[in-house]
Image (tube, rainbow, N blue to C red):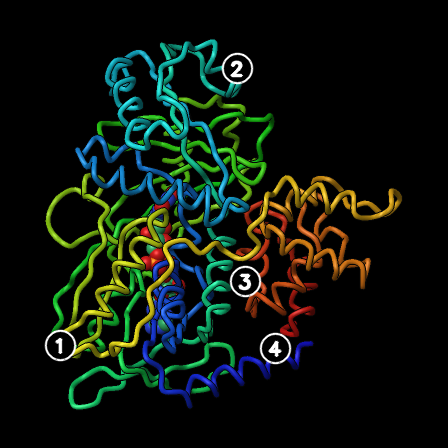
Amino acid sequence: MTIAIGSSRAETREELSTTAFDLLVIGGGILGTSVTWMAAQAGLRVAMVDAGDFAGATSSASSKLVHGGLRYLQTGNVKLVAENHRERRALAADIAPHLVKPLTFLVPIYKGGPHGAAKLGAGVFLYSALSVFGDGMGKVITPHQALAKVPALRPEGLRAAAVYGDHQMNDSRVAVMTVRAAVDAGATVLNHAEVVGLRKTSGTVTGAELRDRLDGTEFGVSARLVLNATGPWVDHLRRMEDPDAAPSIRLSKGAHLVLRRHEPWKAALTTPIDKYRVSFAIPWEDHLLLGTTDEAYEGDPAAVSPTEADIAQILDEAGHAVRDEQLRREDITYAFAGLRVLPGGPGDVAAAKRETVVTRGSGGMLSVAGGKWTTYRHIGKHVFDTLARLPGRPLGDEIADILPVVPLPGLASPEAVAMRLWTDRERSARMDPLVARHLATHYGSIAFDLARLIREDPALGERIHPEGPDIWAQAVYARDHEWAATVDDVVRRRTTLTVRGLDTPEVRARIAALLGTG
Ligand SMILES: Cc1cc2nc3c(=O)[nH]c(=O)nc-3n(C[C@H](O)[C@H](O)[C@H](O)COP(=O)(O)OP(=O)(O)OC[C@H]3O[C@@H](n4cnc5c(N)ncnc54)[C@H](O)[C@@H]3O)c2cc1C
């Protein structure tokens, strides 16, 4: 098996270096993946490479919300909220109902807080109106009602809570499913392959020079058009195109914590900290996700990580609304940080509008960065349309229309999948219902492929760590079908071991052996 993976990377490199592609996408975060998916659907020969793992940077460091963005109402950006809502509802209803789930949010209103009940009540009403009340009507509830939903809510000084609806996901899993959708549509992809230089023909960018980060192999890719979708690295790539390119973006760091949860939460909390900033406390993967910070960042994007000051700030801000018992340091299972890409220019980063920056350089390379996870299809379509209509039509005229709604692989009702996984086997050999639910909500109907692996080798049905729902079949599947090549690819992004704090040295060693890297 290990040899197969080694040779399949070599085969992919060979394909990348010998094919004349229409489009090379540099960066396999959600934006690059989205454009790759669209381009493949349109019938183009498209390649996508990432220096690290797919979604290994910003796209797995988000707040995991598929949301309209309540706080953008603060900056008056009603159009952005309505657009986000449309995409949120499309993802939850048509594209990925198996991976994106609804979640109720409470905005606790405390005595002396930055916003009063009347303003927040009007805010959540407008917010729900902008999604045509598809998730019910935003309203204000009593402290008693709020505490019934979130018993860990701090009761002292609580006046009321505003309620609204949004969705959440496991961002790494949705990203890998989107990569799979792109590959199913015909794209060629390779992770752990870094662009170290650009190819140019008469001053025009026509490809890239790459280095395989796993074994150091150097190779190149030729393409009619190159898209730079490297998120926080976007200006680094733009300088490869033109050493004098002026900065187009600035970065803001956002850190999060994951904590063990002591009781069920029926809703998440969006707690206003000041006029612009909020603190999220979100039930996620049976844990509690807290965040986030928002602070200008000028260092190396690869070095971004949560600091002790970030951890203290997140716990402190969560403490505005969450009881101390739920905020113990010993319950922290994981901390992570990512970088928001904001349009360049003056002003406080926390007040800057979250918009997408699209630029075209002197060598004809299009660069895209910023925007939201939630609107990845919308941004992908916009970028793809821009590429398709560039002066001189470098992609040609033979581009098929992209269907507006193509679901992600595994589309199925997670409840039905979980039930079938559970009942499909005789009583004595039934899958643990928790594991069945975990597989159904992270793979959709692809969970049946995992069940098949378990039928062939029952040991693959065992949990990787006794305290979490991830099983060995997932690690094997990640290696063989989801491009996982390093231990972190498996424990951090294909499964939930790291976020639960269960990637012990023993677990890591066993996974390294499975991948053939140990
Ligand atoms: C703290 C935080 C919270 C957020 N929360 C939410 C949320 O809850 N909901 C929401 O909708 N949005 C959220 N966002 C926004 C969302 O996460 C981003 O808009 C999205 O992930 C950006 O994706 P991307 O593909 O542009 O960038 P990235 O995911 O960073 O992808 C860029 C990729 O380029 C690769 N790369 C870089 N250099 C090279 C090179 N030389 N060669 C090859 N590859 C290279 C990197 O390895 C990386 O994988 C959040 C963002 C942050 C920072």
Q: Which residue is mark 1?
A: 362
89 or 244: which is nearer to us?
Answer: 89
CB-based contact (under 8 Å), mark 2 and mark 4: no
Q: Amino acid at mark 2?
A: Ala
In the rendered image, residue 204, in percent from the top left (x then y), is placed at 18, 84
Quarter holding residue 500 = top right
| Residue 57: numbered disc | none
Q: Which residue is mark 2?
A: 148
In the rendered image, residue 213, in percent from the top left (x then y), is placed at 46, 77
Q: How many C-alpha atoms fall within 10 Å of the one at disc 2: few (<14), some, or many (≥20)?
A: few
Q: Amino acid at mark 1?
A: Ser
Q: Amino acid at mark 4?
A: Ile
Quarter of the N terminus within the rendering:
bottom right
N-terminal of the pair, mark 3 or mark 1, is: 1
N-terminal of the pair, mark 1 or mark 2, is: 2
Q: Is residue 211 visible?
A: yes
The Cα–Cα distance between marks 1 and 2, rounded to whole angstroms, is: 59 Å
Q: Which residue is mark 3?
A: 489
Quadrant field for ligand 1: bottom left
The Cα–Cα distance between marks 3 and 1, rounded to whole angstroms, is: 36 Å
